[in-house]
């Protein structure tokens, strides 16, 4: 059975990987999650994200991305600027979660960036393959992807907190 530290690191990496599907969703999820915590986090970035204005800003950006993703003129997520943004997002949430859960922030940032890049390509080809194989319009597949990102993200954050409470 893996140690609590290993399980925590794997969950942080999995959460960071979600940036490969939706670059702003992990940040918005983390912000919304932190606003519900009873004690304010000690890290200043986490304090900003846990504020009402932080939650509004990140949620607005994530909602804008969800809408833009459904538009036909939106560039591929695998294009260099989008890929770099997803890697930065994955690394950023990874580093912050690492700091909040007593993990090496640098390691979580690197692993989060790599995981976000891997998920970028995995979800791009999966979504394209599903679109070709099934008679489902791409915006509907994208909505399913949105739901998966938000539900799994929320679950990962809750499980990280439960794991921290056990330790």
Image (cartoon, rainbow, N blue to C red):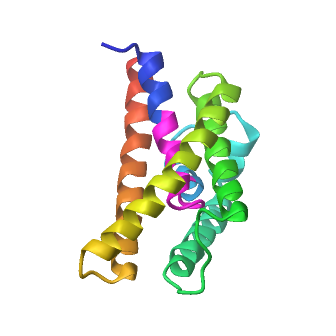
In percent of width and height, residue 30 lies at: 54, 49
Residue appearing at x 65%, y 38% in the figure: 96
Q: Quadrant of residue 3?
A: top left
Q: Majority secondary structure of the magenta segment?
A: helix
State the residue in front, 88 or 136: 136
In the image, residue 47 above or below residue 146: above
Is residue 142 left or right of 47 when viewed as pictured?
Answer: left
Residue appearing at x 41%, y 57% in the figure: 149
Is-magenta flag for residue 22?
A: yes
**Quarter the C terminus occupies:** top left
- Residue 32 appears in the figure: no
Residue appearing at x 60%, y 86% in the figure: 73
In percent of width and height, residue 69 lies at: 53, 76
Q: How many marks?
A: 0
**Quarter the N terminus occupies:** top left
Which residues are the magenta region? Answer: 12-26
In percent of width and height, residue 76 lies at: 58, 71
State the residue in front, 95 or 85: 85
State the residue in front, 47 or 150: 150
Q: Quadrant of residue 43?
A: top right
In the image, residue 151 above or below residue 107: below
State the residue in front, 70 or 15: 70
Is residue 24 left or right of 38 when viewed as pictured?
Answer: right
- Residue 120 appears in the figure: yes
In the image, residue 111 above or below residue 135: above
């Amino acid at each position: 059975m893996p140690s609590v530290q290993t399980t925590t690191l794997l969950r942080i990496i999995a959460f960071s990987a979600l940036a490969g599907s939706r670059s702003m969703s992990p940040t918005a999820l983390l912000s919304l999650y932190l606003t519900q915590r009873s004690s304010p986090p000690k890290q200043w970035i986490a304090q900003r994200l846990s504020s009402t204005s932080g939650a509004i800003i990140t949620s607005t950006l994530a909602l804008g991305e969800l809408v833009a993703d459904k538009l036909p003129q939106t560039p591929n997520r695998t294009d260099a600027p989008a890929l770099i943004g997803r890697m930065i997002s994955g690394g950023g949430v990874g580093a912050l979660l690492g700091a909040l859960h007593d993990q090496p922030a640098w390691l979580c940032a690197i692993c989060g960036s790599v995981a976000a890049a891997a998920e970028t390509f995995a979800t791009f080809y999966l979504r394209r393959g599903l679109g070709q194989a099934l008679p489902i319009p791409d915006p509907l597949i994208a909505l399913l992807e949105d739901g998966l990102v938000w539900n799994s993200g929320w679950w990962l954050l809750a499980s990280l907190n439960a794991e921290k409470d056990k330790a």
